[in-house]
Image: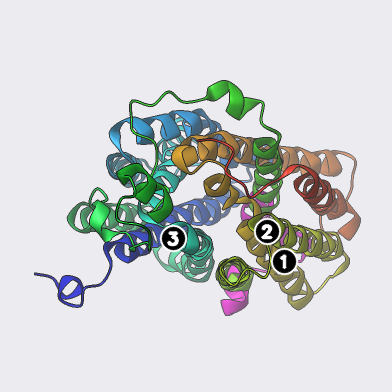
Amino acid sequence: MTALTRMKFPKRYVIVLLTFICTNVCYIERVGFSIAYTVAADAIGVNQANKGMILSMFYYGYVLSQIPGGWAAQRIGGRRVLLLSFVLWSLICGLIPLDPKREVILVLSRLFVGVAQGFIFPAIHTVLAQWVPPQERSRSVSLTTSGMYLGAAGGMLFFPSLVKHMGAQSVFFVEAVLGVAWSVIWLKFSSEPPRTDLPKVSMPKVASREKIKAQAGGVVAPRTVKIPWRRIIFSLPVWAIVVNNFTFHYALYVLMNWLPTYFELGLQLSLQDMGSSKMLPYFNMFIFSNIGGVVADHLITRRILSITKTRKLLNTIGFVVSAVALMALPLFRTPSGTVLCSSISLGFLALGRAGFAVNHMDIAPKFAGIVMGVSNTAGTLAGIVGVGLTGNILEGAKASNMDLTNSETWKTVFFVPGYLCIFSSVIFLIFSTGEKIFE
């Protein structure tokens, strides 16, 4: 008997903690590759367009497996899907050499890592929809997704020094070890959700078993239930989530993949010399993501605001403040100013996840993995478009004899996601809802 069992620690908390570690490790991998590849590519003079192509290949693979990931989690269970995904991408990281001259191998490896990781978030949403009752969803999802940002912060803090002292290839080894370790822990401590673990709900004894399941946990649909694809695709609340998911990831992926280049080329500052300040934007996301979840659940459970108004409020605050910070970022020419603006931007984007990112479970608790797969497909397309487009913007600026140390060169890079944030917040205000629309 484990210590957790002796303390009668609810199993759903263990599941949430494990999914938090899961997203943490995934983003350690993504940030780690960006840092290691940037150093290796710059050492041999790879141009910005080619760097953008390699960095964006992950998202081409990622987009292919979003909807299949939701479908697979619905059919064979999110627990199995998460395990298979982690084993696959960990093996690839452990076996593939990091050599910028071998572009074909890098393209294929990043493509397959993207495919493998594309199953993860739809599977996580399926697992959480099975385990977590409605009154705990905002903070549970926020905690789980905040693992992404803590992982990114940790990667930004430790990997530059690791690359400097052990070489770029060492990053791949560390990532593979972390992936295998999580797989072993998940296999040992996770399980399918028993009905008895969900919180008891006060209701008449004659209530039906289906009603108990619906009130206690909003468990996903049985695997034989037909998925309402047409209603999902043509639902305006779903599209409100999709648009905001696209914008969130456009801003996140542009900063995640190109902020190291902005520090190195735009500010002429080495990441190794920045100390712990380079991790602050992602650590801020970790803090604000959890603040958003706690605030949302407080507003809902105390009946201060409805679910709909809570989602719209936090989404709007998060995206509008982030837009202002993004557009101010290239105006600051100091490391502290850049760190401040990127921290505010990413922090409030994470706060906004208490709006659109939890909304999958509000409108479609039985099909949360499916709806997440649809919306995360858009988020992944944002990675393809944003990361690749940024590389071409910078390469075009160089072709026009513009200096990459000039703030004017970088304005377009940061203004585009800023404008998208404003547009998306308006769309969510108009079309989103917190009511269940898919039974």
- Which numbered disc, 3 or 2, marks the residue closer to the eye? 3
Q: Position of residue 58 (x, y in %)?
A: 52, 38
Q: Amino acid at mark 2?
A: Leu
Q: Which residue corresponds to mark 2?
A: 259
> Which image quarter holds the N terminus?
bottom left
Is there a contact, CB below 8 Å, between mark 1 and mark 2? yes
Q: Does residue 303 appear in this view?
A: yes
**Residue 156, percent from left and from top:** 54, 66
- Above/below status of 294 relative to 364: below
Q: In this image, 82 relative to 302: left or right?
A: left
Residue 276 covered by magenta stretch: yes
As shown in the figure, which amino acid type bears the numbered disc 1?
Answer: Ser
Report which residue position mark 3 lands on. Answer: 24
Task: Judge the density around disc 2: few (<14), some (14-19), many (≥20) Cα neighbours within 10 Å.
Answer: some
Distance from disc 1 to disc 3, alpha carbons, whole Å, reads 20 Å
Q: Residues within 10 Å of mark 1 (few under 14, many from 20)?
A: many
Which residue appears at 25% of the width and 72% of the height?
A: 9
Look at the picture and state if 279 lies above or below 404: below
Does 59 appear in magenta? Answer: no
